[in-house]
Image (spheres, rainbow, N blue to C red):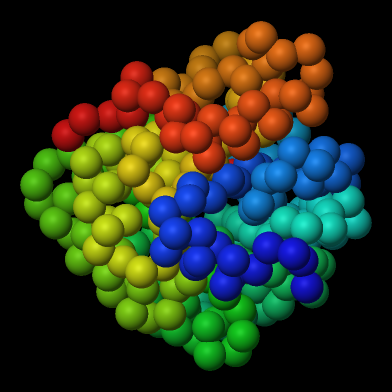
């Protein structure tokens, strides 16, 4: 059991203290993030892009996710480890159970699934079987081909109403956490207030219960040179990776990151 548990995250939300999350894919960075005080390590399927060099997250397999989850577990002592179910690993309820078991047995403490209301049944089944679930809503990169690109979601009133309703339904289904990616800041704030579970944002403004960034992005590393608006390079003004990680934790806790310029309007 890590020092940070679901109960810790719930009490941080209740106290109004921001939760810090970063993606992490290996033991050395898991250790460095622990030293900096990052509370949640997300073994994200973004590893398909930043480690493997693919142009989307779609090629990533559950076996690869389990491998990186096990690497992170070996370097981790304190943080809660959240691992992504990759593309189509939750296509059926049976696959969802089997693949979640693989990630939990590799060292995850919670799994993350991308989608909306259709996730409710699998979230309920997983929670009943002892697997905490984070539902990733808004821009869901595994659906990039349906969405027509990496675009802000929930900008019109119908979409916003649907996202608010889905968030509440997924909490009722048993989700332990929500992650909102590229959602207008005002909508993300409303959803964070409407549910009791912690809501983590990326490109969702400063009024969510916590923040996440892709590790390589916040260290100023990019293969393509395209940097999303919501990213801040925390290496600027720092002389080591360790101080950049610490600066991220301090800025999220101090609510100086994200700034208005990192968010989106409706
Ligand atoms: O895979 C990932 O890194 C993610 C973040 C973008 C939240 O899901």
Residue 71 in percent (x, y) is at 86, 53
Q: Is residue 126 visible?
A: yes
Q: Is residue 156 left or right of residue 200?
A: left
Q: Is residue 180 left or right of residue 33?
A: left
Query: Which residue, as the protein is rendered here, is positioned at the far left?
Result: 157
Residue positioned 64% across, 53% down in the render: 40
Where ligand 1 lies, by image quadrant? top right
Q: Is residue 141 visible?
A: no
Residue 85 in percent (x, y) is at 60, 61
Is 216 above or below relative to 204? above
Residue 185 in percent (x, y) is at 27, 38
How many marks are shown on the rendered structure? 0
Quadrant including the N terminus: bottom right
Residue 204 in percent (x, y) is at 36, 39
Query: Which residue, as the protein is rendered here, is positioned at the far front?
Result: 15
Quadrant for residue 84, please give it.
bottom right
Quadrant for residue 95, please give it.
bottom right
Residue positioned 37% across, 81% down in the render: 173
Is 148 above or below relative to 101? above
Quadrant including the C terminus: top left
Residue positioned 60% across, 89% down in the render: 129
Query: Which residue, as the protein is rendered here, is positioned at the far bottom?
Result: 128
Is 236 above or below relative to 181? above
Q: Choose between 224 and 16: the one closer to the eye.
A: 16
Residue positioned 75% across, 39% down in the render: 36
Quadrant for residue 207, please give it.
top left
């Amino acid at each position: 059991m890590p020092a940070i548990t679901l109960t810790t995250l719930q009490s941080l939300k209740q106290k109004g203290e921001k939760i810090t999350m970063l993606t992490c894919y290996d033991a050395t960075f898991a250790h460095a993030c622990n030293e900096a005080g990052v509370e949640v390590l997300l073994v994200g399927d973004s590893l398909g892009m930043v480690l493997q060099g693919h142009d989307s997250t779609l090629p990533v397999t559950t076996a690869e996710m389990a491998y990186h989850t096990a690497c992170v577990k070996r370097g981790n002592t304190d943080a809660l480890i959240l691992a992504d179910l990759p593309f189509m690993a939750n296509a059926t309820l049976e696959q969802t159970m089997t693949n979640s078991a693989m990630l939990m047995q590799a060292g995850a403490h919670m799994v993350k699934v991308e989608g909306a209301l259709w996730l409710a049944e699998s979230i309920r089944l997983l929670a009943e079987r002892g697997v905490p679930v984070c539902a990733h809503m808004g821009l869901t990169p595994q659906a990039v081909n349906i969405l027509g690109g990496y675009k802000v979601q929930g900008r019109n009133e119908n979409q916003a109403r649907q996202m608010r309703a889905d968030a509440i339904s997924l909490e009722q289904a048993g989700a332990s956490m929500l992650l909102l990616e590229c959602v207008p800041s005002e909508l993300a704030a409303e959803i964070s207030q409407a549910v009791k579970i912690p809501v983590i944002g990326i490109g969702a403004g400063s009024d969510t219960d916590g923040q996440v960034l892709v590790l390589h992005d916040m260290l100023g590393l990019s293969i393509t040179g395209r940097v999303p608006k919501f990213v801040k390079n925390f290496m600027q003004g720092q002389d080591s990776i360790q101080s950049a990680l610490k600066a991220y934790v301090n800025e999220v806790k101090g609510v100086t990151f994200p700034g208005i310029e990192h968010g989106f309007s409706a």
